[in-house]
Image (tube, rainbow, N blue to C red):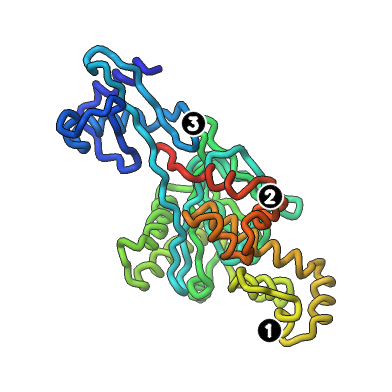
Amino acid sequence: MTEPLIDRVESIKSVAHHPGAAACDTAGRSDKHMGNRQTPVFYRACFAIKSLLVTHDRGRHRTAARPRPGWRGHSLRIEYLPMKRSITSRANLGSSARIIHSQKPFTHRIHVEQSSLVAVWKGQSCLRWAGHELLVRPGEIVALASEQTFDVIHIPCPRSGFFEAQVLVCADPVVKAFLERRPRGRRINDAQLIQGGSEGLLASFRHAYAGFDEKLQLPQAIVTSRLTEMLTWLDHHGGYFATSSSNQITLRVRQLIGSDPGAIWTATMVARHLAMSEATLRRRLAAEGSHFQQLLLDVRMARALTLLQLTDLPIANIACEVGYSCSSRFSSRFRQRFGGSPSDIRSAAAFEPAA
């Protein structure tokens, strides 16, 4: 496989810069012998090798070419640097996030707090809820209603070994403003796959997603306009979001804990916030098939999973963010909840796949 790889490196005459890779000469040649790192040779090597992740060494993807005449006995190694993961939010507008990992499929339960759109780019995503199942393929978008719970399986692409998706969250004020236009589709109560996706639809999603880019610093009105355009496309394809008007005590408890998962929440404290006695709180939760401790664990673990997949915060910091001062106890709870350790999730999502 390395011979064709060398041929590719030598045959490509020009290629754009690939910031996700760094090249080094394994024989230790200096820059004055290598030339500037941003030479056409470096670009061609990045372009030719970036999609060939053939080994995995201590969490670092790399590929190495054997020496060949003309390379003066030296080999070129391309190493992929960890990607920067983050969640970008705008007050009263929503947020954007990128999901990416390379681990084997596993099932985890998510609770969708606000109306969301998920575009799958690599791999597949399987959602299950209340006897239903929905498979989202590459290039498709699924709309998820607020305050719904799903069992989700992210299945990496067999060829690249990665799953990649982008999430666009629409805040309630944006959804309420769109409802004033009286959409013609059907209210989305759980999950809806947007059928017949077009280039216009996908372009609108990317446009709205890019609106949260902190580098652009777009005015709030512009970001709102982009989100509204995306909601218009959603309505055009037969569905629209609605804000939650549920008075379920389970929902109110989730929202309260979710406002600060790291706080020391007790049933007494939550009952006080909701202006009721602890006995009344527990009775109403039981009537809805819920339990306070289980809700507390669900909210905290869901937030931890999000932070592990979408940010670069250290695991110890994430444990503190969700109310655990002991990292080992946090890891134990996380493993019980999702069937894998936090480090498994973090290492699986630490590298950016080839484009």
- Judging by the rendered image, the residue that carries numbered circle 3 is 56
Q: Please report whichever mark, 3 or 2, sits nearer to the chain's N-terminal start.
A: 3
Q: Position of residue 266 (x, y in %)?
A: 73, 75
Specify whether 205 is left or right of 140. Answer: left
Q: Residues within 10 Å of mark 2 (few under 14, many from 20)?
A: some
- Who's the residue at 30% across and 40% down the image? 18
**Residue 126 has which mark?**
none
**Residue 335 has which mark?**
2
Q: Please report whichever mark, 1 or 3, sits nearer to the chain's N-terminal start.
A: 3
Amino acid residing under circle 2: Arg
- Judging by the rendered image, the residue that carries numbered circle 1 is 273
Amino acid residing under circle 1: His
Distance (Cα) linking label 1 and label 2: 31 Å
- Who's the residue at 48% across and 59% down the image? 168
Q: Residues within 10 Å of mark 1 (few under 14, many from 20)?
A: few
Farthest-out residue, bottom: 275
Depth check: give the residue in front, 293 or 224.
Answer: 293
Q: Residues within 10 Å of mark 3 (few under 14, many from 20)?
A: few
Could you say whether the residue bearing mark 3 is in a helix, strand or loop?
A: strand
Identify whether 277 is placed above or below 161.
Answer: below
- The quadrant in which the N terminus is found is top left
Identify whether 39 is placed above or below 339.
Answer: above
Identify whether 86 is placed above or below 76.
Answer: below
Distance (Cα) linking label 3 and label 2: 24 Å
